[in-house]
Image (cartoon, rainbow, N blue to C red):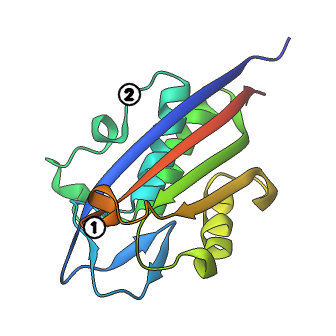
Amino acid sequence: MTSIRIGHGYDVHRLVENRDLILGGVKIEHTLGLLGHSDADVLLHAISDSLLGALALGDIGKHFPDTDSRYKGADSLKLLIAVYGLIKEQGYRIVNLDATVLAQKPKLAPHIPAMRQNIASALECSVEQISVKATTEEKLGFTGKEEGIAAHAVCLIEKI
């Protein structure tokens, strides 16, 4: 019998001036960027948390604390690769992953193919196993008011 596990992840970061906007490992031209100890890639953080959650391994804050200077400005794609290493150590692989970014601006649709490719490469799977969507919140809440960007992710993993 195949052992399967589901995980959910959520992350949010504030939008500020003088920071790059990086989502899914893609640098996106925008007047604001995300504030965080690492590169603040909310999409990759939510994905990492979903993977860690699927195996009850905590969250990325446990594995890469913001109190540790080694992770200052860290590339979240590298953190995702490290998280996937933990998943592989437990004998699991990705079945599929579905993620949604909540952002009023900028428009993310043109960047989604590159995001999916980055994520698939980091997780050693095909692009067809990775879904990334983007939505606005119709100018409601902190994302709608362009104060921040949030992301949700759900993954399904299976024992190899």
Residue 92, how many percent across, how many down?
A: 68, 30
Callouts 2 and 1 close, C-beta under 8 Å: no
The residue that disc 1 covers is 145
Residue 130, how many percent across, how many down?
A: 70, 54
Element type at mark 2: loop
**Residue 15 tag number:** none
Nearer to us of marks 2 and 1 is: 1
Relative side of 6 to 144, left or right: right
- Residue type, label 2: Gly
The residue that disc 2 covers is 58
Relative side of 29 to 5, left or right: left
- Residue type, label 1: Lys
State how far apart marks 2 and 1 are (Cα). Answer: 31 Å
Please, is residue 80 above or below residue 1 in the view?
below
Visible in this render: residue 75?
yes
Residue 114, how many percent across, how many down?
A: 64, 75
Could you tell me which residue is drawn at 69 percent across and 32 percent down?
A: 157
Mark 2, other Cα within 10 Å: few <14 / some 14–19 / many ≥20: some
**Lower sequence index among marks 2 and 1:** 2
In this view, the residue farthest toward the right is 1
Could you tell me which residue is drawn at 61 percent across and 76 percent down?
A: 109
Visible in this render: residue 78?
no
Please, is residue 7 above or below residue 80 in the view?
above
Q: Quadrant of residue 70?
A: bottom left
Q: How many marks?
A: 2
Element type at mark 1: loop
Residue 122, how many percent across, how many down?
A: 61, 58
Could you tell me which residue is drawn at 64 percent across and 47 percent down?
A: 98
Could you tell me which residue is drawn at 75 percent across and 17 percent down?
A: 3
Task: Classify the position of the N terminus by image quarter.
Answer: top right
Task: Classify the position of the C terminus by image quarter.
Answer: top right
